[in-house]
Amino acid sequence: MTEFLIALLANITIVGVVAAALVQYRRIDIRLGWLALLLILFLAYFLALILGASLLPLRSWFPDLQWNWGGKLAAVLLWLAILRGLERWKTGFRAADAGFTLRQAPGSLKPVLVVTGLFLLLQVTLNLLMGDDARPNRETLLFQLLMPGLDEEPMFRGVLLYMAGLALAGKRFPVFGASMNWAGLLLVLLFGLVHGIAFQQGAWHISPLIVLITGFYGLVLLWLRERSGSLVMPILAHNLVNFVGQLV
């Protein structure tokens, strides 16, 4: 746990340096109250993933489970609690403001489907180039088809994205038809860093390739969220990419 927190602090510090530069160049304004809450909930998310297996002891009921179902379910419960808190205490907040809506932005269906198709093609290509010959079992396929999108998208591209927009306020700008802001891009950077930089057994393990790939994946998912105005396609795309990646 200590080593994980060290790595997480290092990743947050890197993003903090970038955010400070954006403040210096007057691209964003920092609101300390929302920023503190954002960081607390970000840490709570990873604690839910780590401690969820103990809090939700699914392995005592299903001892053959290999994947962290308990941690993922705990993370789902966390974003549900955050969403409920925003609805109750944030004046004027609607769930749709954080992407929790089935309604898709007008004119978004075709570009979103095209990008999702290219996203899947990229995953297939990378797996053919870098994958191994191991065949996934049924639990692995079911986990990848369900949990990554239901856990990470409502959290990173949902409630945390909304709160980051409050904590790191700045103007929006168009990116291939999607309206984005620096807060979302900083979350993408953090998303890539936490996947590619770790501190284990007293040593740093840094994979620039993983940072680059997961960061780019996070950017695509952010684009889908902002272009469609909904979490529906990011969730579907995330799960499909993970699922297809196991089949190739």
Image (cartoon, helix red, strand yellow):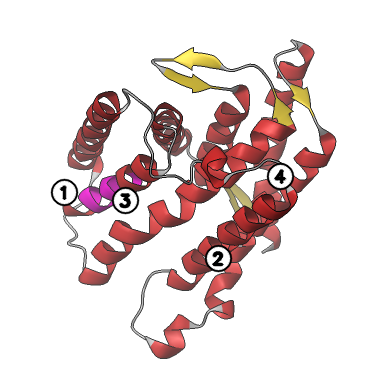
Q: Which residue is mark 2?
A: 77
The residues tagged by marks 1 and 3 sit, at their Cα atoms, a distance apart of 15 Å
Marker disc for residue 22:
none
Q: Amino acid at mark 1?
A: Val
Q: Residue at x 27, y 71 (%)?
A: 139
Classify 150 as above or below 16.
Answer: below
Between 63 and 198, the one lying in front of the other is 63
Q: Element under label 1?
A: loop
232 up-or-down from 183: above or below: below
Looking at the rendered image, the quarter that the N terminus falls into is bottom right
Amino acid of disc 3: Asn
The Cα atoms of the two marked residues, 2 and 1, are separated by 32 Å
Q: CA distance from mark 1 to mark 4?
A: 37 Å
Judging depth in this view, the residue of 157 and 71 nearest the camera is 157
The range drawn in magenta is 238-245
The numbered mark, 3 or 2, whose residue comes first in the sequence reads: 2
Residue farthest to the bottom, as pictured? 61
| Position in image of residue 101 (x %, y %) | 44, 44
